[in-house]
Image (cartoon, rainbow, N blue to C red):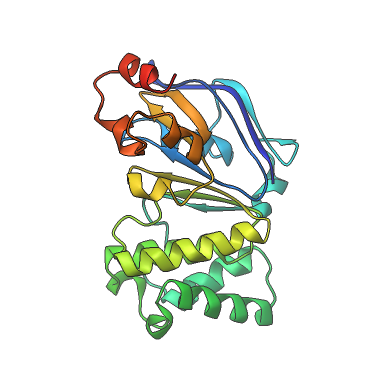
Amino acid sequence: MKVVVNQVEKAFKKQRVLSQISLTIDSGRIFCLLGASGSGKTTLLRIMMGAIPAENGTVTVGGTKVPDRKLLAEMGYMPQNDALYEELSVWENLKFFAGLHKLSRKTFEKKATELLQVVDLLPEKNKLVRDCSGGMKKRISLAVALIHQPRLLLLDEPTVGVDPVLRRRIWAYLKQLKNSGITILITTHVMDEVTQCDDAALLRNGHIIAKDTVENLIGRTSCGNIEELFFMDGESEMEAALC
């Protein structure tokens, strides 16, 4: 599903969080929003899924203007903070969210088993969420976001707290999803993860200061390393490096 963000702005209590954000995410691509905490990444994701309104500007998903309830069935959203039911088991959480999307029992069991294998939690499927570690909850949340087989994935720092081996497995699975035509938007502040994506936008203080394919962004830095972008002082210096 193609996503078009046009001149989106947002403020909370007169504090400007997003300023004239415009970007296009093509179908079947992995798009990265890269920025430090407080740069506006999470706010933009919430606007894109229709959870909060934009002050100005528009977002369209698959040609439909957000918010639209019909789009919710096409989206999978993983927040930074888990939104799970602590008194239910891992399996029961997946079953509950699958039920909201009216998955058949056969489809649910097949998909849940597949996802729990990806996030390395199948042996723990009967464990109560309240007894799971923070890293495990992140992995459950990712499985929940994928359980209804969405066409658009919005993932807010999905691999934070995940060990390197499992992180590689998750990225391999995300690339499989991309190859099947699913559009993926991921936020991160981990610079090496950007290289796993097709396209990226760099956010600083609510502004997009650069956007391009990841290959082009890296090529436009003096040292050919995207980390250079985050060790510059001030927006003007970063913008100069990207000209």
- Give percent across and percent down for residue 199: 53, 40
Residue beneath the point at 64% across and 63% down: 149
Residue 13 in view (yes/no): no
From this view, report whether residue 78 is shown above or below residue 235: below
Classify residue 121 by image quadrant.
bottom left
- Give percent across and percent down for residue 77: 52, 52
User: In the depicted view, which residue is nearer to us: 71 or 30?
Assistant: 30
User: In the depicted view, which residue is nearer to us: 202 or 62?
Assistant: 202
In this image, 199 relative to 124: left or right?
right
The quadrant the C terminus occupies is top left
Residue 96 in view (yes/no): yes
- Give percent across and percent down for residue 213: 53, 37
Residue beneath the point at 54% across and 77% down: 114
Residue lying farthest to the right in this orientation? 63
User: In the depicted view, which residue is nearer to us: 98 or 217?
Assistant: 217
Residue beneath the point at 31% across and 63% down: 162
From this view, report whether residue 218 is shown above or below residue 17: below
From this view, report whether residue 122 is shown above or below residue 195: below
Classify residue 15 by image quadrant.
top left
- Give percent across and percent down for residue 124: 37, 82
Number of numbered markers:
0
Residue beneath the point at 35% across and 23% down: 205
In this image, 180 relative to 202: left or right?
right
User: In the depicted view, which residue is nearer to us: 21 or 57?
Assistant: 21
From this view, report whether residue 98 is shown above or below residue 121: above
